[in-house]
Each structure stands twice: as structure tokens, then as C-alpha cells.
Image (cartoon, rainbow, N blue to C red):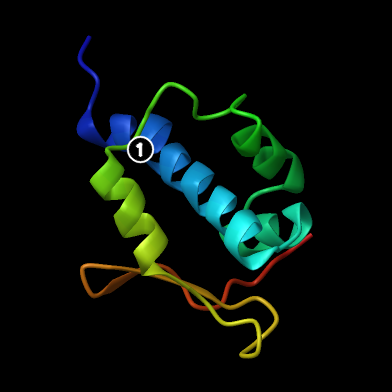
Amino acid sequence: MYTLPQEIEVLFILPALRRELSKELIKTYGITYEKTGKLLGITKAAVSQYISHKRAAKIRLHPKALERVKNCLLYTPDADEDSLRVVLGGHCMIPKKRHITN
């Protein structure tokens, strides 16, 4: 059975991007695991697993892709409490505001 491109994206690429975004938010902006999780729409446990390489460890992004992720991250803590925008190629990959539901 063949793996569809969408399956590869969901199982490997998106988690690798979340891992790098988590690292960058925590390292560069000093945001807590909990706030990082809210911003990315994941749990703080998932953030911890991304940081400790227990999740999304199979994929290593190309150094140019890593640099692009870092350069595209625009976090504005003074806007709203949960504003995050990742601009890739002029398009928003993650909505500026996410509604967190319990």
C-alpha cells in the first residue's frame, strides 16, 4: 500500500515544523510551554515532547528550511494574548488568532 502525500505531511512534516516552532518560541521569545502549546494548538505535554525529541524525531529539516522557519516567525505579545503568525511565501500558515476550547 502506498503512502499518500497528505499522510506524509500530517505524520512527518507538520510535526517537524511544530517542533521547530516550539523550540524557537521558547528559546527566542522565552514563552512558557503552556503558552507555546496554546499558540500552536497543542498541549504543553506535546511541546515538552517536541523539545526533548520524543516526538517528531524522525524528520530533520534542511538547514535552509530551519532558517526560513526562524525568519518567518512573527510573535507579537503586545497584540492579543494569543497572536501568532507564521508567514511562509506571503501566506499565513497558522491563523493570527486561535480560539482555545477546553
Picture residue at 22% right of the left edge, 27% below the top: 4
- Residue 93 drawn at (x, y percent): 36, 64
Locate residue 90 relative to residue 27 in the image: left or right: left
Locate residue 25 relative to residue 35 in the image: left or right: left
Judge whether residue 41 can be spotted in this image. no
Picture residue at 49% right of the left edge, 78% below the top: 96
Give the mark count: 1
Image height of 94 relative to 81, above or below: above
Judge whether residue 69 can be spotted in this image. yes
From the image, which quarter does the N terminus lie in? top left
Image height of 51 relative to 84, above or below: above
Locate residue 4 relative to residue 13 in the image: left or right: left
- Residue 16 drawn at (x, y percent): 43, 38
Q: Amino acid at mark 1?
A: Ile
- Residue 27 drawn at (x, y percent): 62, 55
Furthest residue in direction top, as rendered: 1
Q: Quadrant of residue 70?
A: bottom left
Picture residue at 67% right of the left edge, 39% below the top: 46
- Residue 22 drawn at (x, y percent): 58, 51
Q: Secondary structure at mark 1?
A: helix
Look at mark 1 in the image and give the residue it sits on: 13
Q: Quadrant of residue 45?
A: top right
